[in-house]
Image (tube, rainbow, N blue to C red):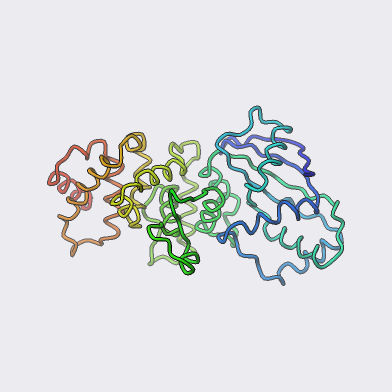
Amino acid sequence: MEFKLYSIQTDTVIDAFVVMGETTYGEAIQHLFPLINKFDSQRKIQDKKFYEKLKRDISDGCVIPPITIAFIDSELPSPFNIKSALDHISKNISNGFILDGIQRLNTLKRAFDENALDLNKGLFFNAIFCTSEDKLLYRMITLNNGQRPMTPRHQVEVMMRNVLHFSEDLSVQTEKERSRKIVRGSFNFSDIVQAYLAFITNSIHIDNAKIIDEKMDQLLVGKILENDPKNYTVKLEQVINLIVKFSEHKELKEWLKNTNNLIGFCVGISGSFSIIEHLNTEDFWMHISKFEDAFAGLDKSKIKLGKVRKQLVRFFISGISKLKYLDELELLDILGQEIES
């Protein structure tokens, strides 16, 4: 694999290494182009006519602006230097994904298919090595903010499909996959995306039919950028592992598959992860059952059920260290007060 690395910088905001390097058109077509079609959630290829001029320029010998590759690994090489970074790329190239440059790579491949190219011509790239998908999403948002192609939700979809390798432990299906064959007991991928948006923004207010999509996306970007990545105390992977653990319990799994419960859980968990991670499934279900019994005492005709469920699940999960000791009526009283506040 012909990859050359020139320099390394440390991104102290997201605790990542950024490597500047160069490869060739031939290597890019062989090793990088396949990465753009790894998942359905990757950005759709734009109409060919928008990139006809770039295709002609590539054939005529232009220099393609650098693309950006990303790698996420909980354990990066140590020490991290040119040699270890190059070795990491060589061994893990199939696990990388294109953070920026999908359209350029696709156009390069079209130019190769339609014209004779100098496959030894250099292609510059940046490679980001990060240990946290949450922090890398922050960087994705800052890179793409103000550009039209990718909404925050789309970037979350790309991130989650590239980083999280869902398995039988947590069966997840997209709408497209469900249209072909429904896997009983599987989570909706769209619900997982919604829950992660709530988690990363620390807000249950991630959707509002009264706000047009473009403005809602701007609000989501603002909420993400308000959170300093250095303050992230719980990672998405940890939350997913907790969901996997509790999904072993039939009733808990059904409870978590409710979108509003999942969103409230993911927002509230940051404040109580160290407590909840040590609960076994039966104990956690006992607490959730008590919450549901108390919730059933609310007058449904006087509340917006979905909104209130998200609000109160978040409240209960984040304050479970104290709320778990209340009996049903005491908890109902507290939940009622929380709605009024």
Q: Nearer the viewer, residue 95 or 335?
A: 95
Is 43 displayed left or right of 254 in the figure? right
Residue in view at x 26 percent, y 45 percent: 285
Whether 45 is drawn above or below 73: the answer is below
Task: Give the side of residue 189 with respect to residue 124, left or right.
Answer: left
259 or 16: nearer the viewer: 259
Q: Point out residue 143 in the picture as x, y percentages from the top left corner.
A: 60, 50
Q: Quadrant of the N terminus?
A: top right
How many discs mark residues in the rendered view? 0
Find residue 119 and report its horizontal and vertical position in percent.
84, 54
Estimate the x, y position of residue 158 in percent, counting from the top left: 55, 55
Farthest top residue?
79
What residue is rendered at 50% in x and 44% in y? 134
> In the image, is 134 to the left or to the right of 85?
left
Q: Determine the residue located farthest toward the left in the rendered image.
A: 329
Residue at (56, 44) in percent of width and height: 136
Vertical side of 47 occupied by 24: above or below:
above
Is 340 in front, or is 132?
132
Would residue 315 appear left or right of 201 to someone viewing this image? left
Q: Position of residue 155 (x, y in %)?
A: 54, 55
